[in-house]
Image: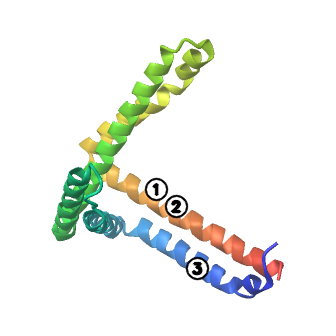
Amino acid sequence: MTNTRENNNWWLTVIIGILFIIIGIWSLLTPASTLLTIAYFVGFMFLMTGIFEVFSVSAGNSNWGWSLLSGAIDIIIGVLFISMPAGEAILVICFLFGFWVLFRSFLGLGIILSLKNSDVPAIANSSKGIMLLPIIGIILGFVFLMSPIVAGGFIVGIFSVAIISFGIFELYWGFFLKKNS
């Protein structure tokens, strides 16, 4: 059971839910703006990650050089993303997404193929049915790379559905708190 103080502020949770639903719907209706926001957010995250990594390098760490290099590369990528013209930033995020899907799908296929060589029959046979999933991922990865518009739509769709789902949960939770106060 939740505490009484939390229940008294149920309406804040409902407002947050409504705002998330509105943002999710807005992102579906404005895919270019949403993609640009996502691209700049990714750039900002690279920049912050790089800065934190550079400042956390310790001379006591035997891999300090690699950490410093990794941080510097992240900073450069972040600055490039943030300083790119809007169209290029959107295109780059779509291609990165396509390459990521392709990479992860090939990795998944490799894992499944390695399971087929297992000495344990249950493991060797379990991979047959699941092999279709990374193959679908590989096909989608190539589609995303061939058509950034499809990739962009997919990215915006996933983002929007996630935001709307979170908003619906917040609405449910707010009214649950009200009911139990």
The reply to whether residue 25 is visible in this rendering is yes
Using the rendered view, name the quadrant where residue 64 is placed: bottom left
Mark 3 highlights which residue?
16
For label 1, the residue is 158
CA distance for labels 2 and 3? 14 Å
Asked whether, in this view, residue 161 is left or right of residue 42, the answer is: right
Label placed on residue 87: none
Q: Position of residue 161 (x, y in %)?
A: 51, 60
* Percent coordinates x, y for residue 162 in the rendering: 52, 61
Label 2 neighbourhood size at 10 Å, few (<14), some (14-19), many (20+)? Answer: some
Dot 2 corresponds to which residue? 162
Marks 1,3: beta carbons within 8 A: no
Mark 2 touching mark 1, by CB under 8 A?
yes
Q: Amino acid at mark 1?
A: Ile
The amino acid type, in three-letter code, at marker 2 is: Ala
**168 in relation to 69, above or below:** below
